[in-house]
Every structure is written in C-alpha cells, then in structure tokens.
Amino acid sequence: MKAFRTGAIGFALGAALAAGLGVGSALAAGADDVPLIPRAKFFGNPEKARARLSPDGKRLAFVAPVDGVLNVWVSTDDKPENAKPVTRDTHRGVVNYSWAFTSKHILYSQDKNGDEDNHVYVINLESGEIKDLTPIEKIAAQIEGVSERFPDEILVGINDRGERQFHDIHRVNIQTGERKLLQENPGFAGFLTDDDFKVRFAINITPDAGQELLKAEAGGKWEPMIKIGPLDSMTSSPAGFDKTGQHLYFIDSRERNTAALTSIDLATGKQTLIAEDPRADIGGALAHPTEKTIQAVSFTYTRTEWKVLDPAIQPDLDYLRTVADGEIQITGRTLDDKRWTVAYLMDNGPVRFYLYDRGPERKATFLFTSNRELEKLPLARMHPQVIKSRDGLNLVSYLTLPVWSDPDGDGRPNQPLPLVLNVHGGPWARDDWGYDPEHQLLANRGYAVLAVNYRGSTGLGKEFLNKAQREWAGKMHDDLIDAVNWAVQEKIAIKDKVGIMGGSYGGYATLVGLTFTPDTFACGVDIVGPSSLLTLLENPPPYWYSFMPVMKLRVGDWTTDEGRAFLKSRSPLFFVEKIKVPLLIGQGANDPRVKQAEADQIVAAMNERKIPVTYVLFHDEGHGFARPQNRFAFYAITEAFLAENLGGRFEPIGEAFAGADFSVPSGKEAVPGLAKALEAAPAAKPSAEKLP
C-alpha cells in the first residue's frame, strides 16, 4: 500500500494524520510516540565544529556559520564566546583548515562549486588579510608539509605544468606569498618530506599496481629502496619520520594480513614492529608534537580501540575516559604538549569538544557540542553486527533501528521493518560506528538502516581488501545481497520492502542492485554513482593519472578488447532494460571524478526505453552535496521517494528548495509533491522533461 499524504508538516505521528503528513503502512506500532524530526536538524550546518588550539595554546579556532555559511572563527583566548569570523565565504563554506606554526595564521583550501581545483589560502589574524598562495587557474593545489622549524613557510604541491598530471613541490612563504620550486615531479605519484623541508623519498605506482619507495641520491637520481607488491600496495605506505629523520615510520602488511605500524632504521635498514592487531589494520596514531615518538595507536574492527605505547600518556587517556561517553579523538596538541583539544564521538548525539589541560592537576573544560539541538532529539543507537558472507567472510556492519521498534535496545526490532541498505563509497573506504545523519533521518522515518563493509572495504586486512579485485558488480555485490538476506532471516527487514542507496561507489552499487539483482530491491537512490565503468575509467581527472594502474588491476582494463568487454559486463548502463523498480539519481554538474555524463547517459537510456527515473542535477556541486540548501532539497526529495516506495513516513517538501540550485531533467512527477514544489520554488531551476 502506498503512503497516505497531502501536504502539511507535523511532528508527532498521531497529529500528523490530521495534518496530512505522509505516513506509510509498514510502520511498526509505537511510531506515533516518536516525533518526526525535521530533516534540517540532520543536514544543516553544525553550530560549531573542528575545535583546534593554536600551537602556542593561546588561541582557539573552530568552524561555525556566518549567515548560514560555514566559516573559520578565532578567539583571542581559549574561550569560544570571544571568537570572531576570520573568513568571509558566502557560498559553499570553509570547512577544512589548520593552524600555521606562527600561531598567527590560519591555512585552508577551497575549490569552486565542487570542481576540486583547490587553491591554498592563508589568513593573517593580525591584519585580517586573506591571501591566495596559489593564484593559478585550473590547478588542484595541496599542502604537502608544515614544520615547527619553519613557521613562516609551508610546502605546497601544485600541478601547473603540461597536462597537469603531476604535482611539483614548492616552498611558500605564508607572510609574503613568495613561492620557490623545491622539487619538480618527473612522473611520481608523490613525495615524502621531513621536518627540515627536505624531499627524502618519492612514491611511485608501478605498472603492475605495486608501489616503490625511491630514495633521493646525489645528482638528482632516485634509487629504489622499498618495493611493495600489488597485493600490499593499498595496505602499506610510509607514514613520516621521527625527530631525527633517521627512522621512517612505515605501515606494513607484507608477510602479514593486517597492516602494522613499524619503524625502519634508515642507516641499517632494520625494521622494528611497533604495534599490530590480528583483526584490523592500524587506523591512527598519537605522536608527540615535537619529539615525534609514537605514544598510542588505534585499531578499528567494530569499534575504535586505543593501545597506549608510552606510559607517560596513560594517565591522560585514563582521565579522559572519565570525562564523557563516546569514542575519544585527540584533535590537537600544543607544541609544549601542555594542552590538548579532545572530541568525543557518539552514535546518538553530537560531537562534544573539550579543552584539556594536562598539568599536574588534569582538567577538561567543556567547549561546545557540534549541535545542541541534537541533544534534545530521540536519536537512534547504532549496533555493530558481524555478518557472514556466503563464502565465509566477516562483514563488519552497522544497524540502526527506529527507536520505537527496539525498546529494549538489543538491536532487533519487535517486528520486521522496511530496510534501507546504505552503501558506502570508495570503495576503498569503510563504514564506522558513530553519528550518521542519513541513518538518523531514515530510522526516524521508520526504516531499519544497514551499512555493510563489503569486501574491498579498508581497515580490515589485505586479504579482505584483495578479495574485491575485479569484483565490482560481482562478489562485492554478493556481500550486499548476503547482508540483506541476513536482515530478512533475522526478522529485521520485510523482504519486499528493501531499498538501496549510496554515494559514489555506493551509487554504482545502487545501479548494480537494480540491474543485476532486480528482484531484491523495491527502489534505489544513486548519488554521484558511475553508470559505466568504461566511461568512468576513460575520463579520469588529470591528477588521477598515476593511480590508474591501480584502477586497471582492481576494476578492469579499459585498454584491451577483452578488458573492455569485461567492464561492459559489469556496467549497469548496458542492462537498464532489467530495471523494474523506481530509481532516483542525484548528480553534481561539476563532479570531476564521476562526471555528469555518467548520470546523463543512464537517464537517457531509461527514458528511451520508457523506464521511469527521477534525475536531480545540482548545478553548483561536485562529488557530493556541500551546500546545506542543496542537501535540504535532495533529502526532501529522497524521503518522499522512499516513503512512496517503502512505506515510511516523511516530512513534506514544503520550503526545502529555498536557496538550492538544481533542475529535474527527468521524472519530477514520480515523487510525491516534487512537481508542485518546483513550481512554487523560483530559487530552484526546474527544466523540461529532457536531459541538459
């Protein structure tokens, strides 16, 4: 049965019926006791986030909105209430920033409308001046190194030569903007520099998708030092130097399954094991800010666990565990190591930020949460699950349930629910435990939400990762189907009420789900997913050039007839006639990785065959949706789409399109309320039923 809906917004389900709020027939008993949370609570900007002390410990920085757009704020002391904005972005916002070692400058990078042509900027906190340190058109600049030994300078990679495939290393003065070439790149994937701003090693991806670490020799020559085979190349890599520069920290999966942290004496070549875990690769490390000794390491199997290596910080971590619940992240340390910034991650609430003074009398001072409104909401817990694949692999997964469906909190609903399989991108990434706005929105709407670390996901050992080689739409997809079948068998999911959604590779997996396993899913939501592996691999951004041997090995070879035939056999574009359930596609027009043509071509193929598809194209976005206004618009469409096809409840579109920049070239009549909302929203840009 389709959901009943007419149009007004309500918050409690009982009141919602009278108000005309969308309600699906598949909702479990008890839903009327839980308010419908407005989606703006989930997909808006944080109130404050990314708290960082300056290296001298005297100033606090964070990001927070200015007129609805995220900007960097800095206080003259360590109190958030005394902070003022120091950036002036009015469009997509400034999210990623760092302190320069002067403690008087902030560094950040930014592109235009999602095109990933990043520039590096510096803010002079005394004058307020913002300077573009890389004022060159059509580049993708990146900060390559910072050092307390050179507080007025940074190393920046700039790809401004030839076809712009390679980044040269430049030494840049952040005070004057003066830029000097330090290392021209003759064709390497990257370089490793030390705290003296010396280029010590080059990293090269070999034609067989392995890696080489090459040492700089006299006369500009590069001699191979470490060779990594293709089966270890994604789980082994250099990780920096100790204080002397004579010991290289190296993440190494050679001769073992999970990646361990090791140290290599560069004078003797002796390699020493620092830490390892049989279940998971090393995930993070705490290093002393000036001594560069490794003091603790983390591993994430289902949850993140810290292993302390230096007894000097054991009392600090013991104390911090008493301050707040959640997983601890040390987000910054002053140069004298007397003060830390600490974040606590929750699954059912906002991130909590603290200022920690070590001292003889340890003291953690609460700074702020990322969003106080989340603390007032009935948010759902995330339950780790380990699901067996059909060939015996452990699929580390995470299940979120509507709060009314699981009153005893055991991770099993009182009765089966409609389920959304939420597939992560990458695919060389992973899902983790913690607060997830998509999980929270969907659970509040009445769906069980399942996130699966399918084979190829990172952090779980090289054997698990390598079992995904050339298994796009193959065994990687089998893992997702196995997880769905598990959820049905466990009476978590209603078999004919399962949807699939995801971004990037997750979008591709959605298209695979609807073409390769068309009887499993009731609908799909594809966000910036490739529809053809052929066109994806034939049209990469220039700076992917050195990585393409990895794509050839792990995805397929687009340069041979046999390889092209294989890639075609794994591309949803060529199987659109098998799609028989509703599909929603969201795409950024400026996406340099999964280009707009990937969405255009599958929509055109579906339209030609008169297969319904709703296509939402955001004109000022890239590989994902950065602007809150665009997120509000897309998730308003998404939840109405899911309610229509899975039977959950939803918040009507209402004013969700205000300030968004998008068009709907296909299928606006297929989503309840979409056509009407487009007519009423001049800020959005509806188009005729044809592709742009």
Image (cartoon, rainbow, N blue to C red):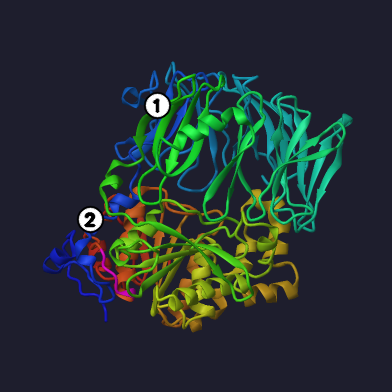
| Closer to us: 259 or 686 | 259
Q: Quadrant of residue 76?
A: top left
Residue drawn at (38%, 41%) of the image: 91
Vertical order, 459 against 570 (above or below): above
Residue pointed to by mark 1: 86
> Quick check: 371 left or right of 334?
left
Locate the C terminus by quadrant.
bottom left
| Magenta region, main secondary structure | loop
The amino acid at mark 2 is: Glu
In the image, residue 91 sits, relative to residue 551, either above or below, namely above
Q: Is residue 307 left or right of residue 274?
A: left
Helix, strand or loop status at disc 1: loop
Image position, residue 512 (x, y; %) = 53, 74
Q: Is residue 305 left or right of residue 193?
A: left
In this view, the residue in front, 359 or 478, is 359
Quadrant of the snapshot with the N terminus: bottom left
Label 2 secondary element? loop
Residue segment shown in magenta: 646-650
- Residue 502 colored in magenta in the image: no
The residue labelled by disc 2 is 655
Residue 570 figure quarter: bottom right
From this viewpoint, which residue is outermost toward the left?
Answer: 18
Q: Residues within 10 Å of mark 1 (few under 14, many from 20)?
A: many
Q: Point out the tag, 2 or 1, that comes first from the N-terminus.
A: 1
